[in-house]
Amino acid sequence: MPTDYLLFIHGVNTHYKGTTPNYADELFDQIKSSASSPSRSLEKITIYWGDVTNPQEEQLRAAYKASPLWERFWFREFRETTLLQFAGDAALYLSRYVGSQVVDLIKDQTLQGLSNFTPDDRLHLITHSMGTVILFDILFSSRWAEPDISGYDSATAIRNIIFGISPNQTQGIKIGSITTMGSPIAIFSLMDAKQSMQDAKNTQNKTSTHDIAPRLEQLLASLYQEIGRRLPWSNFAHPGDPIAYPLGTLLPRLVDGESRYLDVQDMLTHPADLSDFVTEPFSQTLLALLHGGTAHSSYWHSLEVAQGIAQSIRQAR
């Protein structure tokens, strides 16, 4: 029986107790109840990288607290948790040392999860927060293209198992849909800003090492040629999530500029804990920002998100 593989990758501040990561269990169960089919099975691949950055962030947190001025700073809890975890994870992943450790972990889990895929199977990418940036960086950025760097072998192994990514564009499992939740990829797209005229004249500096656009367009074009339709991409954003941004107008500009390959849908999730009456005046206050951490993690428990992903899976079939 053909299989739809659902690959989940988490963002910041995700941990678990036990032997296997369970952060996606509730969402997967809700998806399964909405997308079940007698002709296809659903399999879960839960990627976990959350412990890699802990030691460095704990050292930085201890340094903050050692300052005699720390107790006079406002929003200390926000600084020590949400802000440090997001900015810290981003900075540490972009560093070569920690980034390569994350890539190695993701390679092992991805290859194990897809060890038995067949040509009729499909892969659905479901990414949250910083996990979007990490996965797309591994799949598409040129910073992993140098054979003599740490992480090259692992990044290449992941790319080789996905259809449409060079050098083995015609091999691997085909992506059926992409779902992003609370994604900051819009911010990180600034790393792919157009070059100055001076840079453009330098043959050694043609592209950013973090530019995902060329390989992403290559994958999308290969998929389009193979299946004859645009790839569904659902971007879920809670209105109170400070990390979430719309992607519908950004992604086509990053790729082909004409939406030939992508069907991007931005979808606002509805706050379950606030009435519509309270939400509007509340939305622009500092209290709403402090509520942002709850909003940022809400997608994993949202029936609305699960039903949207299930619809994308059915569409891919």
Image (tube, rainbow, N blue to C red):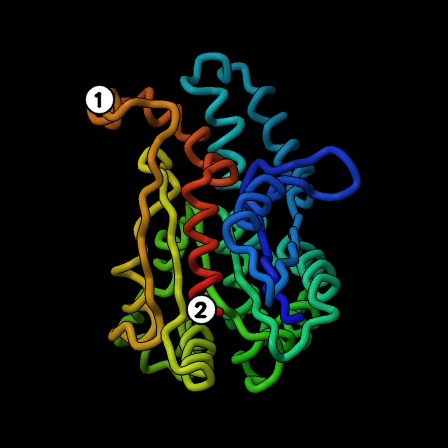
Q: Please give left or right for residue 14 compared with residue 220 in the image.
A: right
Of marks 1 and 2, which one's residue comes earlier in the chain? 2
Report if the CB atoms under discs 1 and 2 are less than 8 Å apart: no
Q: Quadrant of residue 40?
A: bottom right
Q: Residue at x 50, y 62 (%)?
A: 136
Q: How many marks?
A: 2
Residue 277 is marked as: 1
Foreground residue, 295 or 41?
A: 41
Disc 1 versus disc 2: nearer the observer: 1
Percent x, y for residue 61?
Answer: 59, 28
Q: Residues within 10 Å of mark 2 (few under 14, many from 20)?
A: many
Relative to 76, residue 262 above or below? below
Percent x, y for residue 94?
Answer: 54, 55
Mark 1 element type:
helix
Q: Residues within 10 Å of mark 1 (few under 14, many from 20)?
A: few
Percent x, y for residue 43?
Answer: 65, 58
Percent x, y for residue 66?
Answer: 60, 20
The residue singled out by tag 2 in the image is: 212
Task: Report the Cα–Cα distance between label 1 and label 2.
Answer: 41 Å
**Mark 1: amino acid:** Phe
Foreground residue, 270 or 50?
A: 270
**Mark 2: amino acid:** Ile
